[in-house]
Amino acid sequence: MTKQRIKIMVGDITTQNVDAIVNAANNSLAGGGGVDGAIHRAAGPNLVKESLLLAPCQTGEAKTTKGYALPAVWVIHTVGPIYHRHSPDKAAELLAAAYQNSLREAVRVGAKTVAFPAISTGVYAYPREEAAKIAVQAVADFLRHETSIEEVRLVCFSEDSAESHRAALKNMLG
Ligand code: ADP
């Protein structure tokens, strides 16, 4: 029931045909590099105008804007932890919170299909396999109690990243 709503794929999050995509943003919500830059380029200049009105966004929290030129109706901006700034336990807590607060935002705006990038696994240097386990577990824990979300896509940017997520989903208990 829960696991079936989680889809793991390799792709570009900016082209996903879903109600909401999640942006791995930074606290300033001013745009940046990596997936954040790609989302801002694809959405067009109105995205940063709206996101700056909502700034700052604390690590682990999430804020929603429209998707503008993107296929997605909404962009949910969340901020994952910079791995080395926290203890491993605290980093895990913040990463899980980023996923779950993003899904809370999706429910709030009525999004039924949501796509995530692998938050914090780029410049923020979260170890890939550890991050994949936390991502899959956090999403599954949320979906267990929330039936309005029909599909969560974990959109990986490499086959290695997708493999880590597939393994985490397979090994997940419950
Ligand atoms: P963070 O600062 O949270 O680490 P990054 O943007 O540096 O964010 O990286 C997060 C993840 O997003 C990385 O795994 C990176 O490979 C991936 N990524 C980069 N561009 C895209 C994209 N267009 N679609 C999906 N994932 C992407």
Image (cartoon, rainbow, N blue to C red):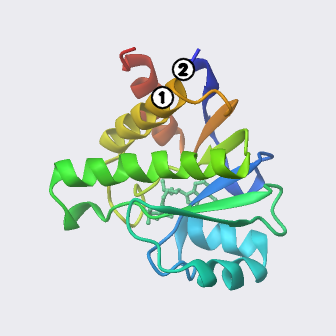
Upstream in sequence: badge 1 or badge 2: 2
Q: Secondary structure at mark 1?
A: helix
The answer to whether residue 144 is above or below residue 19 is above
Q: Nearer the viewer, residue 126 or 22?
A: 22
**x then y, percent, for residue 58:** 40, 70
On-image quarter of the N terminus: top right
**x then y, percent, for residue 7:** 62, 30
**x then y, percent, for residue 16:** 75, 48
Which residue type does callout 1 highlight? Ala
> Residue 59 lies in what quarter of the image?
bottom left
Residue 50 is left or right of residue 54, and the answer is right
The residue shown at (39%, 59%) is: 60
* Residue receiving disc 2: 3
Residue 76 is left or right of residue 60, and the answer is right
Q: Are marks 1 and 2 in contact (CB under 8 Å)?
A: yes
The answer to whether residue 105 is above or below residue 8 is below
Q: Secondary structure at mark 2?
A: helix
